[in-house]
Image (cartoon, rainbow, N blue to C red):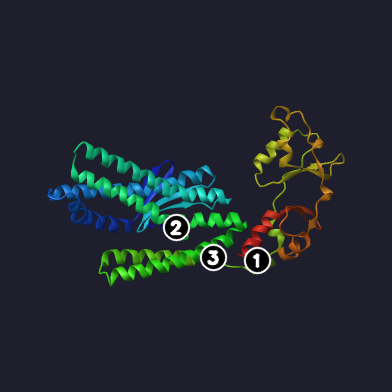
Amino acid sequence: MRTHLRLGRLLGVPIGINGGVLLVSVLLAISLAQVSLPSIAPRHPTSAYWFGAVLGVVGFLVSLVGHELGHSYIAQRNGVRVAEITLWLFGGVAKLEGDADEPGAEFRIAAAGPAMSMVIAVLAGLSAWEIDQLDGSRVLLGLLVWLSAINVILAVSNLLPAFPLDGGRMLRAFLWRRSGRKRRATRTAAMIGQVLAVVILIAAVVLFFPMGDRWSGAWILALGLFLFVAARSQWRDAADRPEVLEHPVGELRRELPAPLSPRASVAELEAVLRTNPRAVFVPVLDERGAVGALVTRDAVARIPPANRASVPIRSLAEPLVALPRVHPAESVQDVVGRLGRGRSWWALVVDGAGVEGVLCSEDVDDVLDVAFA
C-alpha cells in the first residue's frame, strides 16, 4: 500500500512526499515566521514573515529533493537504477534498486548528496550577498541566509560516519575497499552508527533537561532513535549466516549460452555475449558437433572491431576439458574446500544428464561474504 503522495517526476525519477512532511512543514513555517525571521529582520509586518516562511518551507523541500537528486544522478551514472525519491519526516531518501557493485561507486553515490547540499548552500549564500549589496528586502536576505545555513547543516549532518547516513555509507565504502568484504564493512559501519546514535540520544537528553531547550532536544531525540533503529537493523541484516554454506552450488550456477560453430565469427560471439550479460564464456562445438571448447569475453577485446566479422572464433577457443567439474548437489562448503577461495576459477556444473551451467568463483565468494561477515 502506498504511504505517500506522488508529486511527479524530475530527471526521470518519480518524486513522492510522505504525510509526516506536512507536519514538519507546518512546524518549520511557524518557527520561521515567529522566531527566526523576526530575529534576523525585526520591525517588519507579520504578513512578510509568513510569506517568507512559506517560501522558506518550499526552499527547504527543494533542497531535500536536490540532495537526493545528487544521489540519484550519480547512482544512474554508475548503473544503479533509482526507483523513487521520497520526502519524509527526517528529510528525503532516494530508493535505489540494489547497491553499487564496487566501493568506488558506493562512495561517489553517497558523497553526491552532501555535495549537492553544499552547492545549494553556496548559491543561497551568494544570492543573500547580492541582496545585501543591493540593499534589498531584509526578510528575503534573512531567508536566504537561513536557507544557506540549513543546507550546510544538511550536508554536515549527513557526513557523520553513522550508517545508514551518507557519511556512514562513505565509511562502508572505505572499509569495503580495504577488506574486500562488503558485509563485514556494513556490519562495522552499522556498529559505529549505533554508537553515534547513542551519543546523539545523550546530547538530546542534555538539551531537553539541564539546558531546557525542549524543541531541539525532542527533535534530536527523535533523530537519534531513528538512526539507532536503522543502524541496528542494518547490523543484524549483515550478521554471519554460516548455514548458507550448506546450500547446493546448483542454485548458484549461471546458464550457458547456446554453443556456436567453430566457424562463427567474433562478431557473432560478441552478439551472443551482448544478449547474455551474465555469461562468462560461450561453448564452442567441435567438428563432430560436440561441445569441446569455449571462448571467453576477454577474447573479444583482443580482436580489433574492424576484423571481428572475419575472424573465426576457433582461433580463440580454449579446451573445455581444462575446467574442473562440480555436481549441482554439492554444497558450497565442499566445493570451496576442493577448489579454494581467494582466486578466480570457473567450474562446469555437471550431473548425469550433461552440463547444467557454470559456477563462478565470484558468485561463491558472495555466498562466503554472507556466511562470514
> Badge 3: few (under 14), some or many (20 or more) residues near its Cα, within 10 Å?
some
**On the image, numbered disc 2 is attached to which residue?**
165
In the rendered structure, the answer to whether residue 288 lies left or right of residue 345 reads right
Q: Given this view, does label 3 or label 1 mark the residue nearer the observer?
A: 3
Separation of disc 1 and disc 2 at Cα? 29 Å
The residue that mark 3 highlights is 237
**Residue 77 falls left or right of residue 298:** left
Residue at x 52% of width, y 66% of height: 235
- Quadrant of res 23: bottom left
Q: Earlier in the sequence, mark 2 or mark 3?
A: 2
Q: Quadrant of residue 325?
A: bottom right
Q: Earlier in the sequence, mark 1 or mark 2?
A: 2
Q: Along the line of sight, which residue is nearer the eye, 359 or 201?
A: 201
Q: CA distance from mark 2 to mark 3?
A: 16 Å
Residue 329 visible within the image: no
Q: Amino acid at mark 1?
A: Val
